[in-house]
Image: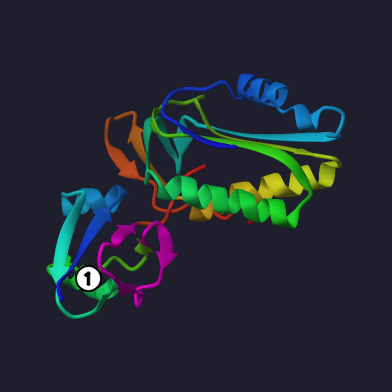
Amino acid sequence: MAVAIKIRYFASLKESLGREGDTLEFEQALNVAEVWARVVPAQAMPENTLAAVNMEYVDMAHPVLDGDELAFFPPVTGG
Amino acid sequence: MIKIVPAEFDPFAEVQAYQAQQAALAGKYGATNLFIGTMRDFNAGDKVKGMTLEHYPGMTEKQLERVVTEAEQRWAMLDSLVIHRVGDVYPDDVLVLVAIWSVHRGDAFDASRFIMEELKSKVPFWKKEILVDDNSRWVAKNSDGYL
């Protein structure tokens, strides 16, 4: 069964990739790191990248499910 | 209450207006602690003329709510008001306000410090600096406030 997810990029990552996000459909289960490898195949994930699924922090092995919003971004610098 | 605001704000007016609306505080609070973070015109040895503050609408609010809830669980806070700017900011603009009301000072001081440190390390905001020569750069990392 095909699974569809939305991927979003923020800050310097958005700028270096030149886009705000991607959509991905896939058949077999993927985790966060595997999604990155699919949508940004030409570039290794920067070492300090953070990931969130549905606006909650997750690690790179976290499974991604149908309808999820997965976000990648650099360390936060607010305040 | 938390607020993410896209325009300049006066932290003192915000605190005054918010406090006036909180009838439950009347007669009960002995301490109010205000932390106000303001934009400098320099960083890392360079003159900075402006910044853009990006955030992740939805996640930013969710994570900030979580930080405040955790503070409420750890300290005896009566009320709090946290406001953070987004968008284009300039030196002397207020970037963040953390106001805490409590019965005794210790809770207000400690909760305020905790909220600021957590905000700076966990809540999704990103700063891009515009230098006086018009070059821009992303701030790579926040420093640890306890060092």
Please tell me which residue is depicted at 30% across the width and 50% down the height of the picture: A10
Please tell me which residue is depicted at 42% across the width and 50% down the height of the picture: B59
Left or right relative to B132: residue B85: right
Left or right relative to B132: residue B44: right
Q: In this rendering, is residue B49 above or below A36?
A: above
Q: Which residues are magenta?
A: A53-73
Residue B147 percent location from the top left of the image? 63, 56
Q: Is A22 in front, or is A54? A: A54
Instruction: Decide if residue B145 is in sight here.
Output: no
Q: What subunit carries mark 1?
A: A
Residue furthest front as drawn: A1
Classify mark 1: helix, strand or loop. Answer: helix
Residue furthest bottom as drawn: A28
**Are there few (<14), some (14-19), or many (20+) residues within 10 Å of tag 1?**
many
Residue B1 percent location from the top left of the image? 60, 37
User: On the image, which quarter does residue B99 sit in?
Assistant: top right
Residue holding disc 1? A35
* Rendering colour mode: rainbow
User: On the image, which quarter does residue A37 sit in?
Assistant: bottom left
